[in-house]
Image: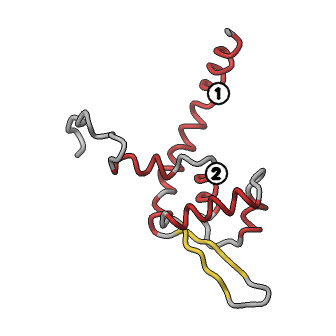
Amino acid sequence: MAGEPMDEYEYIADCRTRLGLDLLSGTWTGVVLWTLQHGPLRPGDMRARIGGISHKVLTETLRRLERDGLVARRRYAEAPPRVEYELTPPGRGMLEPLAALGRWTERYAEEVLDTRDRALSDR
């Protein structure tokens, strides 16, 4: 609860508190979720909107997100077959923390990158 001290064991390996961080730990996870914020998309449309993601990596990311219940896959019985992905309520709930992370990045990215560059040049 807010305002209460944190239990020293709250972040053990199997603690549910870590679930959100674990779900977003993939390189492309947040990008794929953010891309789906305005509604269902076909994988090809997602790849067109996301620069630099391969077909294989997008497929793996979508499968993981579907397994975790953050996206739903809808297959249409058409010729040729058509597949779309859309956010589920838990997936839509991830948009708020992603937006917060985006704000943090806008504010601190340069400082973090400058510090990283200085550390690398001091080696």
Q: Amino acid at mark 2?
A: Trp
Q: Quadrant of residue 47?
A: bottom right
Report if the CB atoms under discs 2 and 1 are less than 8 Å apart: no
Characterize the local packing of mark 2: few (<14), some (14-19) or many (20 or more) Cα atoms within 10 angstroms: some
Residue at 39 percent of width and 46 percent of height: 18
* Viewer-nearest of discs 2 and 1: 2
The answer to whether 122 is drawn above or below residue 84 in the figure is above
Characterize the local packing of mark 1: few (<14), some (14-19) or many (20 or more) Cα atoms within 10 angstroms: few
Mark 2 lies on residue = 28
SS at circle 2: loop
Q: Position of residue 1 (x, y in %)?
A: 22, 46
**Mark 2 or mark 1: whose residue is earlier in sequence:** 2
Residue at 68 percent of width and 78 percent of height: 83
The answer to whether 11 is drawn above or below residue 20 in the figure is above
The answer to whether 16 is drawn above or below residue 121 in the figure is below
Q: Position of residue 36 (x, y in %)?
A: 62, 64
Q: Residue furthest top?
A: 122
Q: Quadrant of residue 60?
A: bottom right
Residue at 62 percent of width and 72 percent of height: 85
Cα gap from disc 2 to disc 1, whole angstroms = 21 Å
| Residue closest to the eye, 38 or 30 | 30
Q: Residue furthest front?
A: 13
Q: Which mark is residue 91?
A: none
Q: Amino acid at mark 1?
A: Glu
SS at circle 1: helix
Residue at 68 percent of width and 16 percent of height: 120
Q: Position of residue 69 (x, y in %)?
A: 48, 67
The answer to whether 110 is drawn above or below residue 76 in the figure is above
Q: Which mark is residue 110?
A: 1
